[in-house]
Amino acid sequence: MSTAHLTGRRALVTGGSRGIGAEIVRRLSSDGAAVAFTYSASASNADALVAELTAAGATVVAIQADAAVPAQAADAVEQAVAALGGLDIVVNNAAVGHMAPIDEFPGDEFDRLVAINIGSTYWTTRTAIKHLGEGARIINIGSINADRIPGAGLSVYGMTKGAVASFTRGLARDLGARGITVNNVQPGPIDTDANPDEGDFAESLKQVTTQGRYGHTTDVASFVSFLAGPESGYITGANLNVDGGFTV
Ligand code: NDP
């Protein structure tokens, strides 16, 4: 594949300041796309990423927007369209987790997970659709926890990611006739701030993979870039695992 297979394409990545989202921003950018990304709190990370990629000659824009607030999620799409001159690729990456026994799960955490993991995916997509044309790509970042829960405390997070998987299938039907593909990438354990390789649950999660190790953010970003490109046009409505064999 050409290293510039996204030249001329314009992408929005939600939650692009850190972790998997930041690596997706880097990869789409190095593969030729102009990229806008959102963040909520870490302005310094966002500024550093913009500086890094701008120095490499890329067009990249950071947008502060709280994914938990529908109006902000929608406005971020319009800001991205205005900044990039249109939109071809949407990556719904922003999400949060919280682990707790179900009978102790805090109500505000339940609301936050639903608002960000499900609500932001819906509002971002809903707003972006009118700007997307033939050949556009919608890529959701779900989780392997939609399919496999390796321990207690993950039921609410898993539920939100199951919703993303289901939304992906329906949306692929809704948008297929317009030549827009919709896919859901389901990572297994990936080393980020949210799930560090040295974290409390890391050793047990490693044992669920076939290789006994965490994945890297680049493992997810390279696959997202392929899905964003011209050679993935017959892949749609799919839940695609990048999980080191977590579900085997
Ligand atoms: P991180 O916590 O490392 O990064 C999350 C990103 O989302 C940050 O850029 C953060 O911005 C942004 N974000 C969080 N809340 C909001 C909000 N309210 N509004 C806007 N942006 C927000 O997460 P990961 O990189 O680990 O996860 C990325 C995706 O991958 C998520 O969808 C997650 O569910 C999924 N995933 C991750 C796995 C893993 O093992 N890491 C496994 C399976 C799925 P800010 O810096 O401003 O806080």
Image (cartoon, helix red, strand yellow):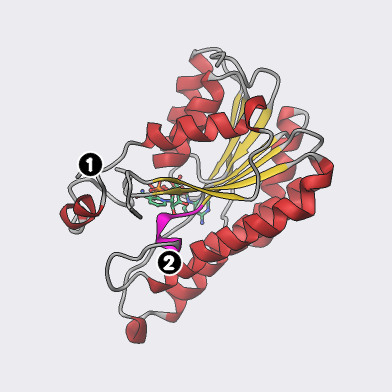
Closer to the camera, 239 or 46? Answer: 239
Residue placed at 53% from the left, 69% from the top?
Answer: 114
Q: Position of residue 209 (x, y in %)?
A: 26, 49
Given the image, on which type of amino acid does mark 2 rest?
Answer: Tyr
Residue 163: image quadrant is bottom right
Residue behind mark 1: 211
Q: In the rendered view, tell whether residue 105 sits above or below residue 144.
A: below
Span highlighted in magenta in the image: 142-146
Whether residue 232 appears in this view of the structure is yes
Closer to the camera, 138 or 20? Answer: 138
> Is residue 119 left or right of 97 when viewed as pictured?
right
User: Residue most toward the front?
Assistant: 248
Residue 96: image quadrant is bottom left
Instruction: Find numbered disc 2 in the image and state the secondary structure of the residue it sits on.
Output: helix
Q: Is mark 2 within 8 Å of ligand 1?
A: yes
Closer to the camera, 106 or 3? Answer: 3
Determine crowd level at label 2: few under 14, some 14-19, many 20+ residues with C-alpha closer than 10 A.
many
Mark 1 vs mark 2: give the one in front: 1
Secondary structure mostly taken by the magenta-highlighted segment of the chain: helix
Determine which of the numbered discs, if any, sits on residue 157 in the image: 2
Residue placed at 70% from the left, 44% from the top?
Answer: 77
Determine crowd level at label 1: few under 14, some 14-19, many 20+ residues with C-alpha closer than 10 A.
few
> Is residue 189 left or right of 175 when viewed as pictured?
left
Q: What separation in Å lies between label 1 and label 2 (alpha carbons)?
A: 24 Å
